[in-house]
Image (cartoon, rainbow, N blue to C red):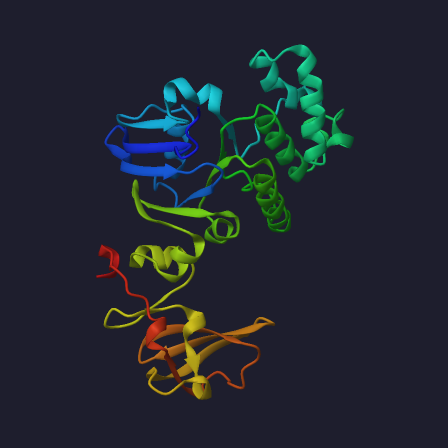
Amino acid sequence: MEDTQQPDVRIRGIVKRFGAFEAVAGIDLDVARGQFVTLLGPSGCGKTTTLRIIGGFETPDAGEVLVAGVPVNEAAKRHTRMVFQSYALFPHMTVRANVAFGLRMDKVPKGEIAPRVEAMLGKLGLADQAGKYPRQLSGGQQQRVALARALVTQPRVLLLDEPLGALDLKMRKKMQGELKALQRNVGITFIYVTHDQEEAMNLSDIIVVMEKGKIAQVGTPEEVYRRPASSYVADFVGETNFMAGGVAVRPENILIGAALPAGASRGKGVVRAKSFLGASTRIEIDAGGQTLFATVPGAVALEIGDAVEYGWRNEDSLNLTMTEDRK
């Protein structure tokens, strides 16, 4: 009987070097069945290398990766599929043929291929595009074809390497919603790579923040944002004011003037810039030589050059481990 409590992916102590550069520096991670997990971090942090190791495209120098309880070198072809940023569609094949390709490579009986392909095309809204070639499709449609080609093979784990990176902002937002709904619908594990913290927050059940080949924090989007483990995480995920003396406060937790409650930490400064954003106003404050940012609801009756009192509730300050660049 299959162990439903076993993680879909288990990583223990993986290390990967490229010459003298250590891209992955010994990480441990469990990914539970059906989760949408995002590896988040800047370029060079090891997120894509980790994804490629899970998919069997790179061999670690040390450590072990299990997919569905099986070492990745044995499991990758059977249990994982990768969706790339470039989509990697075959230009000479129709949408239908692209989606069927993986099933043919897996030697699925011919009679099963057509029904599975048509069902997947319908699920991803591509039924009316089945006879077209990739060059005849929009970027969003090509992305859906790449997803269909991977999902039709029924992998245990779908690996996605910045698959929305080539889309414009409006289409990327639309596809984020579609991708999240698709993952819930098919119910399989997604492991997603991005450097876009907003994208990670929108999509993920769990975010894995990476720094210099290591894991800086693992948690839900709310945990990572509201309780960052270090100044690096606080700075990378969202925006943070780092105060003199080691206190850190998010801009939305900076209160202005009459909004300050009794007992709040307080300071005085001068408004240096103001931007009305519709639902909120962003204010830049010169606080004795330090620049602070506040995001307050609605419009604000302050002008550039005005003196302002600011502060925050003690419970809204972040308790952080300061990384070397902040010490």
In the image, residue 232 sits, relative to residue 307, either above or below, namely above
Q: Position of residue 7 (x, y in %)?
A: 39, 34
**Which residue sits at x=54%, y=38%?**
163
Q: Quick check: 89 left or right of 273?
A: right
Where the C terminus falls, by quadrant? bottom left
Decide which of 166, 8 is in the foreground and name it.
8
Q: Is residue 91 visible?
A: no
What is the quadrant of residue 10 in the picture?
top left
Q: Position of residue 191 (x, y in %)?
A: 46, 37
In the image, residue 179 sits, relative to residue 77, either above or below, namely below
**Which residue sits at x=36%, y=87%?**
262
Where the N terminus falls, by quadrant? top left
Q: Is residue 160 visible?
A: yes
In the image, residue 160 sits, relative to residue 73, either above or below, namely below
Decide which of 105, 119 is in the foreground and name it.
119
Q: Quick check: 298 left or right of 200?
A: right
Decide which of 43, 53 is in the foreground and name it.
53
Q: Quick check: 171 left or right of 155?
A: right
Q: Position of residue 220 (x, y in %)?
A: 42, 52
What is the quadrant of residue 257 in the picture?
bottom left
Q: Position of residue 48 (x, y in %)?
A: 41, 35
**Which residue sits at x=39%, y=43%?**
43
